[in-house]
Amino acid sequence: MNFSDLVQDVVQKDTLASLAALQPELTICATIIAILALKVLAPGWKQIAFYLTVIGLAAAIWLGLPPEGGSIDVTAATVAQPIFTGSMVADSFTMVVRLALLGFAILFTTFTQVSAAGEQDDLTEFYVLMLGALVGMCLMISANHVLIVLLGIEMASVPCYVLAGYKRRQSKGSEAALKYAVFGAGAAGIMLFGLSLLAGALGTAHLPTMATKLAALIHDGIRPDQVALLSLGGLMVTVGVAFKLSAVPFHFWAPDVFEGATAEVAAFLSVASKAAALGLLVRLCAAFSFPPASEIALADLTSVRQYLVGIVSVLAAVTCTFGNLAAYGQTNMKRLLAYSTIAHAGYMMMPVAAAIALVGTNPDGARDAVASLVVYIGIYLFMNLAAFAIVAFLRNATGSEEIAAYAGLGRRSPGLTVCMAIVMFSLVGLPPLAGFQGKWVVFLSLIDAAHVNAGLWALLAIGLLNTILSLFYYLRVVRVMVISPEPLHREAPTVPLMSMVGSYCGLLTLPVVLLFFELDRLLDWARAAASTLFY
Amino acid sequence: MLNFSDPTVVLTWLLSAVVFLPALGALILCIVPGQSDKSIKGFSLFITVVVFLLTVYMALPAGHSASVGHFAIGTAGMQNMVNHAWIPSFDIRYFLGVDGISLPLVLLTSFLSVLAMWASWPINKNIRAYCALFLLLETGMLGVFLALDFFLFYVFWEVMLLPMYFLIGIWGGPRREYAAIKFFLFTLVGSVLLLVAMLMLYFASDVSRLSEAQRIACNLVGPRGTPHTFNLLALMEMGQMQNSPFGHALLWGQSLSWWAFLLLLIGFIIKLPAVPVHTWLPDAHVEAPTPISMILAGVLLKMGGYGVIRVCYPICPDAGYHLAWLVSGLGTLSMVYGAFAAMAQKDFKRLVAYSSVSHMGYVLLGIGAWSAIAGTNYRTDYWSMAMNGALFQMIAHGISSAGMFFLVGVVYERVHHRDLDKFGGLFARMPVYAGISMIIFFAALGLPGLCGFIGEVFVTLGAWNYSKTLCVIAASVVILTAGYILWTIQRVYLGPEYKGPHPEALTPMTRREIAIAAPLVALAIILGVFPQTLFQYTKPTVESMVVQKMADWTLRTDVRHSGSEGQSR
């Protein structure tokens, strides 16, 4: 067989089939090109970018839906399908998390349109950058190869650096963008080094093979220098992922970037970026703790799993606690939400630790743990988007993002205040709001895993304590809105619920209440998402 | 489609209407714009009245006719159960029902809600938000008393938290923010403990241990994805069986059920409240507006007691047996401490608040007096008596304390102070008011012929067999109670003339105020003279719970008792 035949063979057997699995991403790419082309051809048509983005995303969602057409069947598990000669994987985890990302992107696009209504800013570049980052995030969650991991992270990050400084004439935004870019580049460099160490030491860059090789290495007796090299590599990769997750101690960029960037960009960073990073974390952890289809190799990796559980749970505990404590002192709403985002990243890392702990003995439990993460992401998506949306609308109305500026809103804009209160209390995790269900499933999976790894009891206790801790700063926001007296020199803005802005907030808040009652439907999707992992 | 000839459908709608009608009302208030303050209040009052009528319908004795939803008096155990799937993955169900323990409390809640709503007439600030939160609060309270699924119970328990915080925090007195956050913090800690205990019990539960008959009795229906359950009735069965799944050792030599009991107990006595976790109560009461104080004292405190009776004891009987000293001791401590603290108060409302701590101590003592096993004199009657007394005391205190807070509010509205030293001579200025106050205050004092007496006597008698010391202390607290209440009457109502601020404002009670106080006075007298009205509801359930189930459990497991088998019964 000569070379050209080989190429022919690969193109026909692999690439074409792989492209079919990549339809949503390709649709987004086509949308980007279409927006840019129309921008040149019809420069006067301001709204075109918005409509094209929404249409493109809707098409991507439609193409990304499960084949049965919308409903998902947990029993008929899709088999994980490696695409592009194994560099990526198309399974139901990819499918569901991608759908969540795309759905979020549609909501996000309409949100930016609503909040920018009346402004003369051209949002074309904004949408293009957002879509570009989205493609990167989709790559992150379907990564099956070291190169795609890196490619995905970079593709998702670089547009975000630009987005952070999108408002050109604001010095704070530029500062945020620069800070973000420098931090991001550093983290990516360290991660690249870590990945190359791992790939070099294990002799492969294909993630599932890495676990098998690692198990073989341990089985044959691993040398101390290899242990040092591998642990170092693992730690360096952790740095890269922790940066994307804004996990402590790699969170420094988050408050500054959130404060400097617009509330819209902050919403995007805090939800989409985080969801993708968590998806990647699941992929990476699975890669190093679960060798496909080998019982012996699975047993060999026990020590690796303990190491990973240790890293992830310590990171989770520290991130959660630090985020909540640091949020206390904040007077700026976006900074407060930044720390809240950090704390929530901590909560969301907990089920990952549980999944790794469980995978050795109870893959079903591990799948449930991943499902609980997906549930949390699904709920978190609405909560945080709604929170940032309200912040953005209030910024438009008052020109301020300080919490103190919200005084008197309870009387002037009761509808918006109720929405904000619902979102804040959902972030605390009080029933009957969806945030409670997110924490509920996560804690249940932690209890399940604590029977395997007793250290997770401590993580559970920290999670519960943090729930109490977090109450006060969220409550303070609501307290300022409804209880604090209105300053004399100004009037709080009036945003009636029956306006474009008000009803949009109401619509975003509605799922935060409804998902509490419809947990089972969310769980079905989440279980389906996890159903192809760990086989 | 809805088929109203099907009794389960009717029942579902009836119970759901009781629980969610107020929430629906709150939603309507939020959505429908405009309207005058008066019509908003009127609408809210209308909703509470409808809910009250529905609960009265539920309490009517079931006759021979096929009318659905009435209460079968004389029957123990749960009735009118409604059970629907909610979150099948964790076997969380929408499971409601009533028995002789919960029904009186449901009635008390809906009744006091009507009165408190009507007492809210003078409130003028943000009336729409006030009414919406008030109605939401009512949903939470009724839900707690009706829920038979632990998860559902917990959710309703939490639902009350936020409305209460805002009702105190926005419409309260000068230190309202402090009081509201203190209330929130205490209750949230209690909720987290509750959550932990709930998870412990859930994961230890194992449905396969129950026989088919037990499963049917517990309404454990439908396909199950998990061996665990939140069904409170099933958890009770499991807790009381031999080799209970909750019996294994957990930590420091104590069993899972011991720890669960302790966590639940702390969670519930924060709400009750018992010394030493009562400190939120005086602050919350002093700052809360009058109607909210009525609800707080009349209903919210009862949730603590209800939780102990419904959850702690039946599910963890062995822990209850081993920790009876703790429960009774805390009860007695609260009684004594509350009475002394009440005596020292200068603020009228604070005094009433501490009297609540003291009176709720009786409830705890009555629940804790496990007199079935004390000594060798095995008599379940005493425990049953104490338990009935505790239930009666809860209702009686609900009536008398709501009345007292309302009466304090009446005079506060006129003279805008609550300083006991600046009152006096109200009898001459407001004779009707003073007369009503006398009855309500004497009911709280425990004067024979009024409602407070029955509960206290039953509890004290029941406790005698458990511990003579505690019984003597409990009995002597009556003297302290008489002391501070008589002293209060003397300082406020008697004396030659009123010398405090705003004497001109001391106008007689309005017709609305009399109409609110009158039913409370009537109930205080009816229950005092004819306690059977209440006991006929509570007794069968208590007998079955105490005499049959718990005493059986004690007979099986009690070490102290096994030596004296011959003398028993």
Image (cartoon, rainbow, N blue to C red):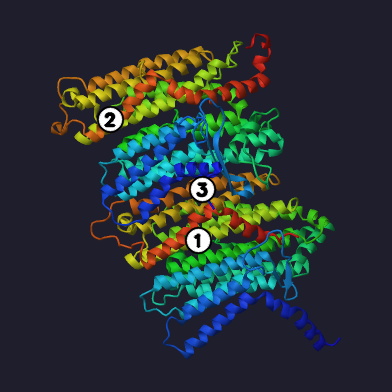
Task: Work out whether residue A511 or residue A328 is closer to the camera in this orientation and state it.
Answer: A511
Q: Residue A399, percent across and down?
A: 33, 66
Mark 3 vs mark 2, foreground winner is 2
Q: Is disc 3 placed on a helix, strand or loop? A: helix
Q: In which quadrant of the rendered image does the N terminus of chain A lie?
A: bottom right
Q: Which residue is mark 1?
A: A382
> Of B489 and B286, which appears nearest the observer?
B489
* Residue B391 position in % (x across, y down): 47, 25
Between the C-alphas of marks 2 and 1, the distance is 47 Å
Chain at numbered mark 1: A
Give the label, 2 or 1, closer to the camera. 2
Left or right, A29 with respect to A289, comes to left
Image quadrant in which you'd find residue B186: top left
Residue B359 picture location, percent across and down = 40, 24
Label 3 sits on residue: A467
State whether residue B483 appears in this view.
yes
| Amino acid type, residue under disc 3 in the picture | Thr
SS assignment at label 1: helix
Is B35 above or below relative to B386? below
Task: Find out whether the residues at labels 3 and 2 contact each other: C-beta distance under 8 Å.
Answer: no
Residue pictured at 40% horizontal, 64% vertical: A503
Crowd class of label 2 (few under 14; some 14 to 19; many from 20; radius 10 Å):
many
Farthest residue toward the front? B65
Image-based side of B317 in relation to B390, left or right: right
Q: Quadrant of residue B149?
A: top right
